[in-house]
Image: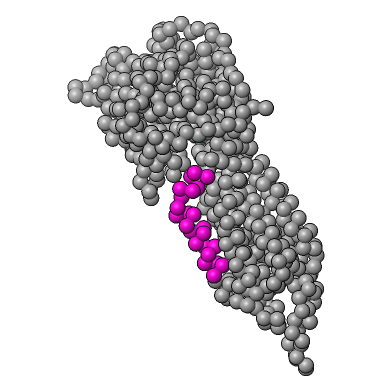
Amino acid sequence: MREVVIDIPTGRNSKSGRVLPEKSLDAGADISLSWSDVSLSVNISKTESKTLLHNLSGEVHSGEVVAIMGGSGAGKTTLLNTLAGRIGPSDLTGQILVNGAPRSKSTWRKLCAYVEQDDLMYTNLSVFDTLTYSAMLRLPASLPPEAKAERVETIIMQLGLNGCRDTWIGNAEHKGISGGERKRVSIGIELVTAPRILFLDEPTSGLDAFTAFNIIDELKKLAVKQNMLIIMTIHQPRTDILELFDRSILLSTGKTMWFGSTADALDHFGSLGYPLPPKTNPSDYFLDIITLDQRSEELRTSSLKRITWFAAAWNERAAKFGHGSKRALELVSEPEVADKFPRSIVAEFLILLHRNMKNVARDKATLGASIGQSIIIMLFMGFIFFKVGNNAVGVQNRLGALFFVAVNQTFGIVMPTIGIFPMERQIIKRERSAGTYRSISVYSAKVASTLPLTIVGALIVAIPVYWMIGLQADAGKYGTFIVIVLVHSFVSNAMGLLIGSAVPNATVGQILGPLVTVIFLLFGGELLNLETVPQVFRWIQWISIISYTNKALTQNEFTGLSFDPCPQNSTSVCYRNGQAVLDQYNLTNPSKWAAVGVNVGLGCAFLVIGFLVFRKTSRPFLKLK
Ligand SMILES: Nc1ncnc2c1ncn2[C@@H]1O[C@H](COP(=O)(O)OP(=O)(O)OP(=O)(O)O)[C@@H](O)[C@H]1O
């Protein structure tokens, strides 16, 4: 049995200004990454394909900071993703080697980390929380909690995050940390495991020049101190940033224009008749001469001719001097890899549940809206259907109130639940790509963390509304009513999660959710005589969660209920007892507890199918075999 202790530090004593350990992460062993003749084509239609990368070669080593530069659409991100293993080998030709050996999924994801361009994080967690959860999830159980806490403190110190350690990440509505700090936190999340290779997609985009310089400067220090290899895409760095790069890869139309130091690049382009004009930033100049100019056909032709010439000049140079390699490639065996995942399934679940609950508990607006919605519905229902009578009107109001309970619980739970996975999918994909946890842990922790609010909301409505409406004053029936409502909340929650795991984004979910609910509603009760419905649609009644709940609620209420005697010579419909109502509306089959059982079964089935769909839709970016 593996450990399940999670012991998450609270950080309560860690106020800004406290003395932090003057220590950096240990320097790692040498590592090299090389690629030769790498080409990538994608099909853009059934008959047409587009080559995004053309026979690229190169070699880089630990301790270096390497920039991939080029104009928009040059192929920078494509190359970064290719080197990072985010493009499947079936789409690529050529070879990519780490320490002289092919990358394998299990070793590669322990060796490298990827910082996305968008800094997606849980907005209600502080910087300290965010880094701590990363450490708890990504570092092995064998490392004591104190060592994990120290790792977090070291990263906070190294990345200059001490001033905002207790500030929430925030978002557009609730301002949290600054853009530069967000980027540092994103980097810190990945540094927790002390990766040997760090890939960054546009780490300076959207930042002011001073902040951009500081971030690259910190990365440079990390590369040297920890003997890490850092590879990033960057648009147009200013001169002092350019000086921090050991080597640059200049790309245009997916071809190498240059690979090596800035000083050598200036000599190279100078020798081709393109010397750097005085008082010009080299990166601005490089981009000017290597970018495909699409402003007119004439400019396109002339710039393409120049780019083709630069590509030929580079190939000629590379054939003579190699691809910028400074050291001989060492054939080193693949690094040792311990377990596939750093923590046990139970520990993963508990840490993720703790993170979810903290994030939810701090979202006061959503909590308030959920509780408020339940209170309003409870009051509204209670007063609209207040103390239904024992006559014909009472029958109608009872049927209406019970049907409304089922419908309201479905809409009230399905709609907010649908958005959860679409909103968090990118974070989950990123974490899964890094091998942070198993898909079952993150899915079940999400299910578990949504249930408390669902149950509280259901109870706020169910407990008082039963007495306000004046349903049968019987403790057994009251208890059964609560159980039926709770089971309905569970199955609605599962349905929301299933839809949410299938849809590509929250907007599609907001369209699909009501559609499914309305169909279930139509087949859910007294609205439709099923005998008149075409055979082809009748099966829907067997998966309509509203139908089962409505039948269970009505059987619970109407069984054993007697009504006022029917007035003599009355022409309107009149029922003598509850059984007559159940018979009239075909509400007797299946029986109350069978209907509850079916809903439990449907809820479990929705969760299982939801998990299978979730696994597909939150597949890691890593595409290595
Ligand atoms: N899956 C794809 N299908 C078709 N074309 C693609 C695909 N992925 C990328 N491209 C094209 O490949 C080219 C390179 O894209 P990439 O994102 O690598 O450029 P980039 O240099 O990072 O640009 P930017 O700086 O604007 O982000 C672009 O023309 C892009 O439209």
Q: Quadrant of the N terminus?
A: top right
Residue 520 placement (x, y as % from top left): 67, 61
Determine whether 28 is above or below 47 in the image: above
Residue 444 placement (x, y as % from top left): 62, 42
Residue 137 placement (x, y as % from top left): 53, 31
* Residue placed furthest toward the bottom: 569
Ligand 1 shows up in the quarter that is top left
Q: Residue at x 72, y 53 (%)?
A: 600
Left or right: where does residue 458 sit relative to residue 114? right
Left or right: where does residue 362 sit relative to residue 510? left
Q: Magenta stretch?
A: 357-379
Q: Quadrant of the C terminus?
A: top right
Determine whether 467 is above or below 605 in the image: below
Q: Is 126 or 228 nearer to us in this picture?
A: 126
* Residue placed furthest toward the left: 278
Q: Main secondary structure of the magenta part?
A: helix
Q: Residue at x 62, y 34 (%)?
A: 346
Residue 399 placement (x, y as % from top left): 69, 73
